[in-house]
Amino acid sequence: MLSRIKWSYFLTFFQVILGVIYFSAGLSKLISGFPNIIGTVWLIDELSKYGLGLFGYFIAIMQAVIGGLLLINRFRLIASLLLLPMHICIFIITILLGWKGTP
């Protein structure tokens, strides 16, 4: 079993990794040319074709906000809880629009 100190380092490591990933994913959708680790930078343009451009901006802003909150140790729990509804929204849109996956 991991000691309490090692467990704390383990959580902090994954907190920072997820924070950087989500923060960069959100900003890459909002700012063209921003480095991207995961996700599609064309999400807002693609959702605009279906009249869901505002929802695309919402997802991008929420990814950046949640990623920023994950980088702050004090807000780790609330950011982790906010990940679930954001992923549900992305999952529902993916199913409803019939997307097979992202490159």
Image: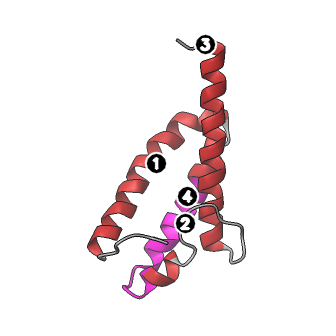
Q: Which residue is mark 1?
A: 83
Report x, y in % for residue 2: 57, 14
Residue 28 position, x and y percent, is 64, 69
Q: State whether the magenta stretch is mostly helix, strand or loop.
A: helix
81 vs 32, nearest the viewer: 32
Q: Tag 1: residue type?
A: Leu
Label tally:
4
Q: Give the crowd class for mark 4: few <14, some 14-19, many >=20 residues within 10 Å.
A: many
The reply to whether callout 2 and callout 3 are in contact (CB within 8 Å) is no
Q: Pinpoint residue 17: horizontal percent, then vertical percent.
A: 64, 44
Q: CA distance from mark 2 to mark 1?
A: 13 Å
Mark 2, residues whose alpha carbon is within 10 Å: few (<14), some, or many (≥20)?
Answer: many
Splitting the image into 4 quarters, where does residue 87 fall? Answer: bottom left
Q: Which residue is mark 3?
A: 4
Label disc, if present, on residue 60 of the rendered structure: 2
Marks 4 & 2, CB-CB < 8 Å contact: yes
Mark 3 falls on what kind of element? helix
Quote the CA–CA distance across marks 1 and 4.
8 Å
Q: Sequence order check: which comes first, mark 4 or mark 3?
A: 3
Asked if labels 1 and 2 touch by Cβ distance under 8 angstroms, the answer is: no
| Identity of the residue drawn at 60% across and 29% down | 11
Residue 101, given in percent of the width and then of the height, sits at: 39, 70
Confirm whether residue 69 shows in the render.
Answer: no
The magenta stretch spans which residues? 47-65
Query: Mark 4 sits on what residue?
Result: 63
Q: CA distance from mark 4 to mark 3?
A: 30 Å
Q: Is residue 61 left or right of residue 93?
A: right
Name which of mark 2 and mark 1 comes first in the sequence. 2
Q: Earlier in the sequence, mark 1 or mark 4?
A: 4
* Residue at the image position 55 percent from the left and 66 percent from the top: 60
Q: CA distance from mark 2 to mark 3?
A: 35 Å
Residue 79 can be seen in this image: yes
